[in-house]
Image (tube, grey):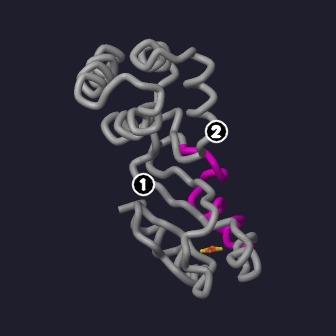
Amino acid sequence: MQQEDATRLIEDWTRTHGRTRDRLLPLLHMLQEEIGFIDDAAIPAIATALNLSRADVHGVVTFYHDFRRTPAGRHVVKLCRAESCQARGATAIEKAATDRLGVPMGETRPDGQVTLEPVYCLGLCAVGPNALVDGRPVARIDAATLDRIAQEIAA
Ligand code: FES
């Protein structure tokens, strides 16, 4: 999506939802939903639309981990790093996942096929270690589960 498209989306959205400062998070969510990430190039247009400084907008975008600043891969695997999953072997699963999927944590594989990200508790603590694969929860992850995930991604 081109920068002009992001600017048009921002203008259309603020016309309907308002231009007050409290509209920042909903606007960012809308942009991520529509474009897939918050492009740094869109920050000036967001700031102007809501009468905020660029630093204000940049600060919010970088504070919340759920806002992407680059496009995600075709598949997104989020591994839980929170306490209960850690106690159930999440660290070893994370190491195995980076090897099996061929991408370091927090990055997108160069072929654009998969992004691997941390997440901090999915509310499924009793059945960890857990992941979200393209938004679908996967519990009790082990080596066999990772193999299935890798096959799904390769398909
Ligand atoms: S700690 Fe992983 S789901 Fe809660």
Residue at image point 63% right, 57% down: 118
Left or right of 39 on screen, residue 116: right
84, above or below 12, in the image: below
Residue at image point 28% right, 19% down: 11
Which stretch did the figure color magenta?
Answer: 92-109
Residue 39's x, y, as percent?
Answer: 47, 25
Per the image, the residue denoted by label 1 is: 75
Residue 120's x, y, as percent?
Answer: 64, 63
Q: Residues within 10 Å of mark 1 (few under 14, many from 20)?
A: some
Q: Nearer the viewer, residue 100 or 142?
A: 142
Per the image, the residue denoted by label 2 is: 63
Q: Secondary structure at mark 1?
A: strand
Q: Secondary structure at mark 2?
A: helix
Left or right of 5 on screen, residue 54: right
Residue 155 lies in the magenta stretch: no
Residue 107 lies in the magenta stretch: yes
Q: Residues within 10 Å of mark 2 (few under 14, many from 20)?
A: few
Q: Nearer the viewer, residue 58 or 148?
A: 58
Residue 100's x, y, as percent?
Answer: 60, 64
Is residue 1 visible to us here?
no
Q: Nearer the viewer, residue 69 or 11?
A: 11
> What kind of residue is marked 2?
Phe
Residue 15's x, y, as percent?
Answer: 24, 22
Q: Nearer the viewer, residue 17 or 55?
A: 17
* Image quadrant, ligand 1: bottom right
Mark 1 beta carbon near ligand 1 (under 8 Å): no
112, above or below 59, in the image: below
Residue at image point 41% right, 25% down: 20
2, above or below 66, in the image: above
